[in-house]
Amino acid sequence: MATRARIPQLSPEQLDELGRELDAIRRELVADLGERDAAYIRRVVTLQQRFEFLGRALLWAGWFPPAWLAGTAALSISKILDNMEIGHNVMHGQYDWMGDPALNSKMFEWDTVCPSEQWRHTHNYVHHTFTNILGKDRDIGYGLLRMIDAQRWRPYYLGNPVYAFVLMVAFEWGVMLHDLEIDRIMSGRRKWSETRGLRRRMWQKGGKQAIKDYLLFPLLSGPGALATLTGNATANLVRNLWAFSIIFCGHFPDGVADFTEEECANETPGQWYYRQMLGSANIEGGKLFHLMTGNLSFQIEHHLFPDIPARRYQQIAPRIREICERYGLGYNTGPLGRQVGSVWKKIFRLALPPSRDRMPAGAARRTRLRALSGARGAEAA
Amino acid sequence: MVTALTVPHGVDRYLGLFNPLWSVGEVRAAIVAVAHHTPDSVTLTLRPNANWQGARAGQYVRLAVEIDGVRRTRCFSVASSQHRADGLIEISAKVNPAGTVSGFLKRKALPGQIVVLSQAEGEFVLPDELPGHILLISGGSGITPVMSILRTLIDRRYPGRITFLHYAAGPEDVIYHEELTDLAAAHPRFTLAETYPRRHGRFGRDHLAATAPDYADALCYACGPASLLDAVGALWLAEGIGDRLLVERFATPAPVTGTGEAVGEIRFVRSGISAPCDGRTLLEQAEAAGLSPEYGCRMGICHTCTSVKSSGAIRNVLNGTVTAEPGERIQLCITAPCGDVELDM
């Protein structure tokens, strides 16, 4: 494994012990799952449905500004709950053990334009298996942005903040297009014709979502059509801004580590846990805040145990933090403002070409090596 | 239109907000009465919603209840008459000391609770044209489907003869003892013989000779423990009247014993392939058998390879947990079979 100043190194014995400790926590959580977890997710689903009803109903009177505002707020909350605490977590298989088809990872569809089947591939498999491995984890920059130093700078990245802003505003569409791997199509590594099936399913799901929010519900509002249309569009936008912010805080604040494919070849379970811990970051906040983030404010715990019900992360967080401290690994956490600020600072900083004095030692070395070898990820570990 | 408005969750998810019984296509039922006719059984009367298409006498339903947050599904024969006027259905469960579901129903079932049902299934039913003599043989909880047949025949004012041979430890163990005695008293063409093996011995030709000497002419329905059904089947086969016997076997759950040794067989039901277990994970064995199931991480985190296991016991190789729930969704990459396993793929 490469020596890098900012990543604490552990011996193989320490890594094995780390793996055993985390496996034990996992077993303990699995053994304790039951009634309360089932009741919790059902409560959240009911809550989401109530906000959705309330939002749609208030927007019928959307010509009256306070009703528009309250309706849009309720619908935004409904969509945030649907995407984060329900959709994201259910589709991770967190509630598969319940045997309820309505909460099953393979059957769930969420209220966003990305077909859940495609998201499960890009997120559950690609992102969660290869977290923060450059060249493997496509969530690093989503094929659009330069989010880590190790990505080689090109003049295209001068637009980094602009692309990030566009991605944030249109986040659900960005997530939908993620699986097309447009960057690979542009560079000729993937054929457009290969994506026919993907595109058809995107068109179907995106179409249904758009018809619902931008045609049917406005039409049902009669003279208030425009108010409903703008309310629905605003709710989708609010959800986009929120989801983007929370999700980018998960892996891109300062101090989060990234890895090379070589470093992660033949990983042991302990090394896998180690990478998940160092590659994720938490956000501090209250109970309501954690609910609205789908408990992705506990990104470190989520990446260690992605298929354990998210309501459990809060309960184990102190133990994970203690483990991190004991092994000398950073436990990256901070308030929302600081984490978001750190992400945007990075988006701006990485728009510019690296200058040696600004870069961490490891990244500088890797950039130099990459420049020498001329190929992404070809440097020796 | 309504469907388009409830994208992507579907109408059912919202209907449930108003009434837990409402659903577009799912059969849900409310428990309206709970009775305990014998110490080790429970009888539930259920009011199914409008999606219920009815059961023919002798059929069964798959009933799902949630226990500790987990939905458990078991098959139960419908015991009520096909012609029951109030549209309710009745099931009786014998409590298996090690049984999760029957024990739960016995202790926790209460009027007002909602259960999920399948439509009725099964071929253990009456023919369109009824013969002149129907012989019913049952043992223990095998009484439920034949009770449904008996009640249906009585409701139809069936003009033929009915002979009912039931095996139980004693009269106090016969779930429908009182009703059967009353029916036998009221209907001269119905002969009831409750048989207690400790007193009368096990099923044999002598029992038939005593109650229905013309059994060879009757259409016979038999349901009960495997030993009883084997004996009945052997006798009918020996007499060359096997085509006049219908048998209903309750599938017994696979014994949970294995530790993932290479024993038993994996059946891939939809592809019609079988392979002997070799102790590896189900994903590896499916691939070795020439199938190409979807997979992702191969380490149990992404759930891409989740599939339905129709029956059999499996072991989670990460934590050693063994489960044998029929129809459970399992991650192929981290489970190994414990003996015979059927996968829906």
Image (cartoon, coloured by chain):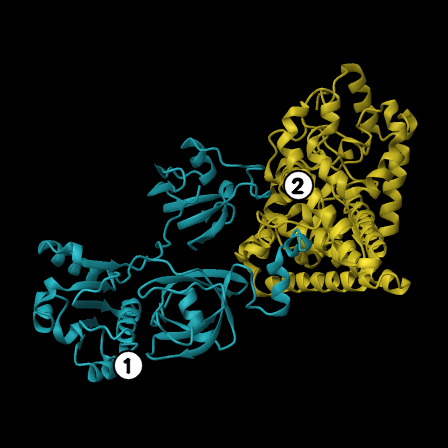
Chain colours: A yellow, B cyan
As drawn, B36 above or below A312: below
Q: Quadrant of the C terminus of chain B?
A: top left
Which of the pair A142/B117 is nearer the observer?
B117
Q: Left or right: where does residue B166 sit relative to residue B11?
A: left
Name the residue located 11 percent from the left edge and 65 percent from the top edge.
Answer: B215
* SS for callout 2: helix
User: Which residue is identified by label 1?
Assistant: B179
Chain of the residue displaying label 2: A
Residue B317 in percent (x, y) is at 48, 45
User: Which residue is identified by label 2?
Assistant: A204
As drawn, A89 above or below A124: below
Which quarter of the figure has residue A162? Answer: top right
Q: Amino acid type of disc 2?
A: Gln
Residue A138 in percent (x, y) is at 71, 33
Which quarter of the figure has residue B125? Answer: bottom left
Q: Left or right: where does residue B214 sit relative to residue B64?
A: left
As drawn, A247 above or below B132: above
Q: Residues within 10 Å of mark 1 (few under 14, many from 20)?
A: few
Name the residue located 91 percent from the left edge and 30 percent from the top edge.
Answer: A358
Q: Amino acid type of disc 1?
A: Glu
Residue A166 in percent (x, y) is at 85, 38
Chain of the residue displaying label 1: B
Q: Left or right: where does residue B291 sit relative to residue B18?
A: left
